[in-house]
Image (cartoon, helix red, strand yellow):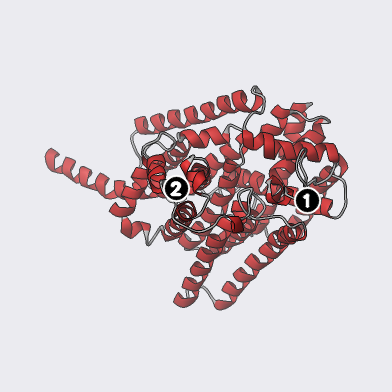
Amino acid sequence: MSIVAFIIGTLLPAISGLLLLTMLEGRNPALFFWERVALGFVFGLTFTMFLAFLCTVASLPLMLPVFLGVQIVVLAASFILRRFLPHAPLRSSRMTDASPAVSPWITITLQTLLLWVIVKAVISGVVFLLMTPTYLDDSLTNWDLRGKVYYVDHALTLVMPNEDPSTSPRGVSSYPPTVPLAKDWLAQLAGNWNDPLVNSIHILWYLCALALVYYAVRRYASREWAMLGAYILGSMPLYLMHGANAYADAFVSVHVFAAVSMLFHAGRSTDDDDRWAYMRIAAVGGALLSFTKNEGMIVYLPPFLLVAAALLWTWYRSKKIPAATIGRMLLCFAVALIAITIPWLLFKWSHHLTFGNAKPFTSLGIGWQPGVLTSIFINTFFEGNWLLLFPLLFLLFIWRWKTAFTGLIILTAYFLIIYIGQGSLYLFTRLSMEALMQTGYARGLVQLMPVAVLLTTLLLKDVWQPLAKALAREGEIQTG
């Protein structure tokens, strides 16, 4: 029964998300097929859980008929809307070779490495999500606990067992309920709470992140570069640990990447239809950030909107896009934010829920925190969590600064705003313990990891192109 529940519980929202994405794309397909599938699952599950949240706010019980009703209504509405709205074909593909052919041995090596990443992820997921009882603090006291309470109470309970009702708004109940609701949905389908079943979705978010990074690179480079990007992300030890355990940070990371990468594609696109499609998808992705974790709304959404506004202003100043089209894009962002972010904000305010990391930001204080800078430096450059990714990325920022701050400015600006902003919180507030104990700081890097990997891969490609040409010329000279 658990296998059937898993298949139905993931397939229904994935199909809905897939269909909705084709309508966001319009007549001209902007996405690769499997990219659309991965993004459809990510958006579809989060969006349908948001609708389930609205149902429980409307006093409907969190029971199977409500969950199933949401899925069926969204699926039916998606099919009906596709008959009347412009949409991309489901099987559309945009595969092109953006780079010269390489040695077959390089291709085979990268395919082998990428296969190993996938096998490693599946084995880790089976061992830690399916065969190991839930033991992580964040799961025991937050994600799984809240999902199980929802399952038992058939309601969006805000006061957890053995919790003081007066302090619960400042605790884990202040987090958006997306992950616990998704676990409750799977348990409702199975008819009982089952840890391996409800935890299984975490590895899907991890695999979706690998797929989205692959196709993001594939837009601008060959298969080999795309495989390298996916391999770099899959080789990060701490990112795999989070993806193959019942944490929510890989879940946040794939939403952050979905929103920011679509904004990046819009900025790089030379096709008006593609640019418009990417902006519509980015608007929905940005709005969904607020329903992931508290960080989604207070850390990742404001810089996303800032970068989006800067992009639109650049287009307006350069007259690259008509003012009327920019106005429609702004309206699209406004509608998405009003539809998704505002209801969750109103719910938080009406129930006095806070916005911090299980503690309100107003209680953090301001002042220099000793030891934090050293801890951040060690964690970033001298531990195995990220291998050599960050030394390489910061070196590439210096070496290829023109590319980083021109063609890749959207990714660079977003990454640096978040990285410097989070670092400032640890350096100047009592959140410093999250850096000194290497917990919150590392989780923040996990949430930014796909963006960092995309930046690194594209900068490496920028380094390799002139280097490869120089080596080719040298070879010709020696042969001559």
In the image, what residue occupies the spot 33% across and 34% down?
103
Disc 1 residue crowd, few under 14, some 14–19, many 20+, Cα 10 Å: many
Any mark on residue 53, and which?
1
Which percent across, then down, holds residue 478? 12, 39
Question: Any mark on residue 416, and which?
Answer: none
| Upstream in sequence: badge 2 or badge 1 | 1
Query: Could you tell whether 79 is left or right of 443 in the image?
Result: right
Q: From the image, tell me which residue sits under label 2.
A: 452
Identify which amino acid the numbered label 2 is placed on: Ala
Q: Observer-nearest residue: 268 or 431?
A: 431
User: Where does the image place residue 3, in percent across and percent down from the top left?
Assistant: 74, 27
Q: Is residue 340 left or right of residue 391?
A: right
Q: Nearer the viewer, residue 311 or 429?
A: 429
Which quadrant would the N terminus be assigned to in this image? top right
Locate residue 298: give its quadrant.
Answer: bottom right
* Amino acid at dot 1: Phe
Residue 100, visible in the rendered structure: no
Q: Residue 445, image x and y in percent? A: 48, 45
Give the SS element for disc 2: helix
| SS under mark 1 | helix
- Answer whether residue 51 is visible to the viewer in this image: yes
Q: Residues within 10 Å of mark 2 (few under 14, many from 20)?
A: many
Q: Nearer the viewer, residue 268 or 192?
A: 192
Residue 256 position, x and y percent, is: 56, 51
The quarter of the rendered structure image containing the C terminus is top left
Q: Residue at x 65, y 53 (%)?
A: 21
**Which residue is drawn at the image coordinates 50% and 73% (left, top)?**
313
Give whichever of 259, 351 is nearer the camera.
Answer: 351
Report the Cα–Cα distance between label 2 and label 1. 32 Å
